[in-house]
Amino acid sequence: MKTERSGVNAVSALASIERPRTRQRTSDRVYKELAAAIRDLRIEPGASLSETDLAEQLQVSRTPLREAIARLAETGLVSVVPQVGTRVEPIRLYDVEQACFVRESLELAAFAVACEKPERDVSELRALLAEQERCHEAHDLDGFFAADEALHRQIFEISGYLGAWQLMQPIKMHLDRFRRLSLPDPETVQVLIHEHTAIVNALETGDAVHGHTHISRHARRALEDAPVFRARYPDYFAD
């Protein structure tokens, strides 16, 4: 059975890696570009990756490319089989569940600390809510996802534990791929904005109890919606 999404050419989905202006390693930049393409479904689950094509498109040598692919394999986003090739791993609900648990646990802790901050400023969060509404009206899914990520990151920023947000990114990408599947659904996007608004309202008033309720419900939405999207995109999933 075919999915509703059209196929994506892995090579055309990538941007070339520019010469660095900092000391960041080429392999780090290649990893960042490939991880983002996999997370955003520009490279679809199950896609085969050719080192030759990737090196040409990214304009890098094989060495940093292989280093980046090895890191992706460590996170479980790709599999590398000698003499066979590299493939983007399908979405596994076990991985999504693990990522949901980590995200919910850390965000609840960050929210509690943020509520205790007397100087907490939610103006940036309000601006991000407005940006989400704008993106929703403009059908800008990429913009909405970026604003969604920025809102949750800002909660960690306010708490003073931004490092926890950064630490969970590798495992969260399993959840992020699943989250991207829901974005074409306007009703789902509107529900997400409503939940984000409730979280921001609770943080502004320092209401940790209701905030925790909203965050838990929001974090677990992906698992509640799993049967629907697994049926809609069967080629993307594996047991």
Image: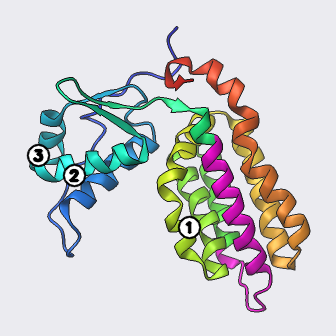
Name which residue type carries label 1: Trp
Q: Which residues are magenta?
A: 97-124
Q: Quadrant of the C terminus?
A: top right
Label 1 sits on residue = 165
Which residue corresponds to the image point at 75% horizontal and 66% vertical from the top-left? 108
Mark closer to the chain start, 1 or 2: 2
Which residue corresponds to the image point at 56% horizontal and 21% vertical from the top-left? 233
SS of the residue at dot 2? helix
Magenta stretch holds residue 102: yes
Depth check, mark 3 against mark 2: the one in front is 2
SS of the residue at dot 3? helix
Q: CA distance from mark 1 to mark 2?
A: 24 Å
Q: Is residue 149 above or below residue 162?
A: above
Label 3 sits on residue = 62
Q: Is residue 188 above or below residue 169?
A: above
Q: CA distance from mark 3 to mark 2?
A: 9 Å
Name which residue type carries label 3: Arg
Where is residue 158? Give x, y as percent: 65, 80
SS of the residue at dot 1? helix
225 left or right of 128 in image = right
Residue 127: quarter of image: bottom right
So how many labels did they put on this image?
A: 3
Residue 229: quarter of image: top right
8 left or right of 111 in image = left
Which residue corresponds to the image point at 50% horizontal and 18% vertical from the top-left? 235
Where is residue 218? Give x, y as percent: 76, 51
35 left or right of 49 in image = right
* Front residue of this view, candidates 37 and 237: 237
Q: Which mark is on residue 67?
A: 2
